Amino acid sequence: MFTRLQLLFTPKPSRASIFFWFTLSLVGAGVIALLSLQQAFSSEYVVQDDARQHVFWLQRLIDREQFPNDLIADYFQSVAPLGYTAVYCSGAALGVEPLLFSKWLPALLGLIAAAYCFGVCLQILPVPVAGFLASLLLSQNLMMSDDLYSATPRAFLYPLFLAFLYYLVRRSLLTCLLAIALQGLFYPQVMLIACGVLLFSLVKWEGKWPRLSSDQQDYWFCGWGLAVAAIVILPFILQGGSEFGPVIGATQARQMPEFWDPGRNSFFSHSPWTFWLFSERSGMLARPERIFLPAPMVFGLFLPWILRSPRFSLTRQTTESVWALQWTVLSSLSLFFAAHLLLFKLHLPNRYTQHSLRIVLAIAAALSLTILLDAWLEWVNRRPTASKKQATWGIVGLLILTLVMYPAIACLKTSYPIVRALGNPFPGYIRGIAPETYRFLAQQPKDTLIASTLLEANNLPTFARRSVLIGREFAIPYHLGYYRQFRERVIDQIQAQYSTDPKQVQQFTEKYGIDFWLVDADTFTPRYLQKSWLQQYQPAASQAANALQQQKIPLLQQARDRCTVLQENHLTLLQASCVVNGG
């Protein structure tokens, strides 16, 4: 039995064995995709958190009259990569609405990523079990993050970067160049990582010192790859960046509360550990609990030592393609520090490490586990004993429980700490709490504009398909041409929302063309202003809080009873014209 078990780690597999484990890899990714779809379609009004930024405006592909003169929609449309928009255009051409398309798309991307992950691992170590472990670990790891399931541009980086690595190690030039081009059209940051991988591939380590490669093919790949990347990025350079530019600089960002905790885009920190390692945007690892889940991912850290140890026979079967993992790490780290140096010209530094390290760690963990299991079985078969056999079955059982049962256990809705420690599967799915409000607003004219400082305002463009003046989810300060207008809107709304002067409220309503106000009971309390995302907009927020503490009743609060058109749960929708005209 143990001899047959060790045959799974034979480095010269048959086609049938490769097909079996490849199919099993897709089955694992498919099961996880089904679990994600179950959550995505658990209610009529469910959307992934980041999709509320990057998907709502795509409704314009179905109806060009959607979101007319909408600053927020115009901005997110302007920063959307061409390839990303083209994919949703193809869905719209088939009659599939963007929100629905965004729920199905991650399942397809997850399957493609699993397939290429299997292929990359098999090129490094020709043992199909390793490919299966790599694809399953990656699929489960992605289940713990909101990147793939956001259906935003960064969701495409996983299949595209894995495709690049696969064709690179197979030395397939044309398909490798195609992968690089697609990276630039969907997520340019990962294209820069790919370019770094090509540059580092020109350096070979033999002995103690590095030297330039003597393989002419390496130079062909690097030269053509960099040329394709330059061609893809050239139109953006000639265009001069976003129409909502310029990009904010580091000095200016340090002076803004938006970039400090608890700001909307918290980046800087007084703690060096947080800033360089654990910050969501500036840190190398961001959320390490997501990178190192499931637990076997930790074994990826031991791969360098395992490959250098002569006691593991299977290490001799690894190909030189294993250097692709090292090239990826070096490229990612180089761009991470470059992004810090050129803040924010290359966008956020974390975007160059978080995703690529997750891919490398999954493959490295699969290689480590395969080599270690093979060495263990070889030791057991050499002098089999009852205790060794029992220990082997225990290890195999634990591994199966961890890898196969992990998604089901993690998806259990329970308060047990041991289950919570496994992580939150498919984080970031948002369920709307005001279906009647969505349906009512959806029946209003398409140029309807809603003013609200509530977090529920983030859902209105997606679920009601109507514009909002502001919303925390849309407070993105990286392009000053956009954010200056957005910040002005926020301050104007705070002043009008808490004003006792009918003339000031009227001027605000007429300036922006407000049709409805969405408020709740807590909106007119000092505590709401002190705890909400509005705190970063000073001095307007503090002035409004002080006025409330002085028992000054805002005009909107006075008009709640007579101007309410819909009340649902704790939300109240007010007619703006009624507020201004006094009834």
Image (cartoon, rainbow, N blue to C red):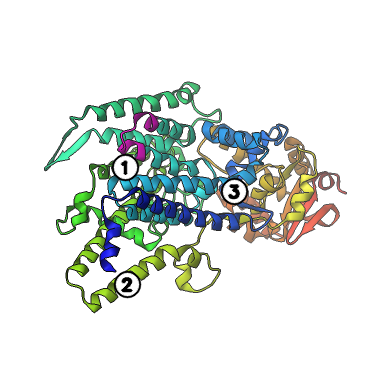
Query: What residue is shown with label 1?
Result: 328
Q: Which mark is residue 463?
A: none
The mark lying in front, picked from 2 and 3, is 2
Q: Is residue 187 visible?
A: yes
Q: Could you tell me how far apart the alpha carbons at marks 2 and 3 are, in whole angstroms?
A: 40 Å
Q: Residue furthest top?
A: 238
Q: Is residue 272 visible?
A: no
Instruction: Give the main secondary structure, helix, strand or loop, of the magenta stretch.
Output: helix
Mark 3, residues whose alpha carbon is within 10 Å: few (<14), some, or many (≥20)? Answer: many
Could you tell me how many numbered marks the image carries? Answer: 3
Q: Tell me where residue 507 appears, x and y as whole percent.
A: 76, 38
For the N terminus, the quadrant is bottom left
- The amino acid marked with disc number 3 is Lys
Q: Tell me where residue 442 appears, x and y as whole percent.
A: 76, 45
The residue closer to the viewer here, 413 or 37, is 37
Query: What residue is shown with label 2?
Result: 393
The residue closer to the viewer here, 90 or 478, is 90
Q: Could you tell me how far apart the alpha carbons at marks 1 and 2 are, in whole angstroms?
A: 36 Å
Q: Helix, strand, or loop for circle 3? A: helix
Q: Residue furthest bottom?
A: 386
Q: Which mark is residue 103?
A: 3
Q: Is residue 174 magenta?
A: yes
